[in-house]
Image (cartoon, rainbow, N blue to C red):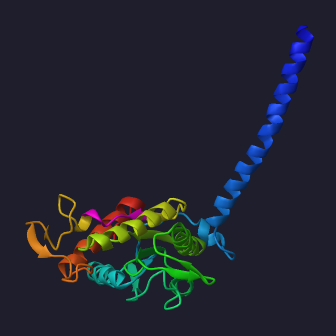
Amino acid sequence: MKRVLIGLCVVALALGIANLFPLLRRDAAGLRTTAARHAAPAGATAAARRPPLAQPSARHPLSVLEIGDSLGEDLGYGLAQLLAGHRDVRLYTKAVGDTGLANVAYYNWPARFRAELAAEHPGLVIVFIGGNDDQGFDVNGRPALFGTRFWREEYAARVATMMAEAKAAGAQVLWVGMPIMASATFSAAMHRLNTIYRAEAAHFANVHYYSSWKLFSTPQGHYAQDLPVGPHGALVEVRDPDGVHIAPPGGNDLIAGAVLRQIRADWSIRL
């Protein structure tokens, strides 16, 4: 009787293991699919495996490429001001107003980004984009309505493509999230985009995400048109009257300074 019971247990165990193998195979396939989505595109070289950033010097200057939309232009103005005296940093501000990742028919950022990477060979890329991306688009004739699951998947794929292109070029990336907006509806849309940026950045070792949301908020978490800035806390206008763009010079300096501090924190370099 004992031998029969033992035999039945062995058979049951064998069947359990056999049934487990398909699950393991499916899990492994899922991991490969996820890895393939975030893999560097064809043509990636050893440059993608270079170590993170070193402190810029006269002998080894750092090229910084800054891209985005009109908000990216605002950040670029601030960076140009703060880095004007830094001889060891070469800043290339290539943000273009009215652009984004949604309407690639108007301006194809993934294609343009590849060209900029090849031309400037940046060690660091700063991305500040999304202000025009609260809109739907078509994918091979299929409409992707803003906020739907299909839209999120396709938009996330475009974000991941940008990050993978930078990885293939051996560049580190600081992806700056959209700021809070005066309109609650527009703010909600920007929050959706930021969720995607943060999630995609987590898949790339060379990409760091920085949230600018609190930077332009009151202590209570509301939109701020003016904020205390500087050592004496003088109240300065930091947003344009349109409730979207960043006001010069105070707002430009505010976000540019925050970005440079984040670079210092993430890569241990001073710019």
Query: Which quadrant is the N terminus positioned in?
Result: top right
Relative placement, left or right, of 207 versus 11 is left
Query: Which quadrant is the C terminus positioned in?
Result: bottom left
Is residue 214 shown above or below 253?
above
Position in image of residue 25 (x %, y %):
77, 48
Name the residue at 68% across, 77% down: 43
Name the residue at 91% across, 14% down: 4
Q: Quick one: which residue is furthest to the bottom in this view?
A: 106
Q: Quick one: which residue is furthest to the top in this view?
A: 1
- Magenta-span inclusion, residue 211: yes
- Magenta-span inclusion, residue 182: no
Name the residue at 50% across, 69% down: 148
Relative placement, left or right, of 131 versus 2 is left
Position in image of residue 18 (x %, y %):
83, 37
Comparing 178 with 269, the one in front is 178
Residue 251 visible here: yes
Q: Which residues are magenta?
A: 209-214
Position in image of residue 115 (x %, y %):
55, 87
Name the residue at 34% across, 67% down: 188
Is residue 119 shown above or below 127?
below
Comparing 20 with 79, the one in front is 20
Residue 52 visible here: no
**Count of labels shown?**
0
Comparing 161 with 184, the one in front is 184
Position in image of residue 255 (x %, y %):
27, 72
Relative placement, left or right, of 72 versus 216 is right
Comparing 132 with 253, the one in front is 132
Residue 62 sits in quarter: bottom left
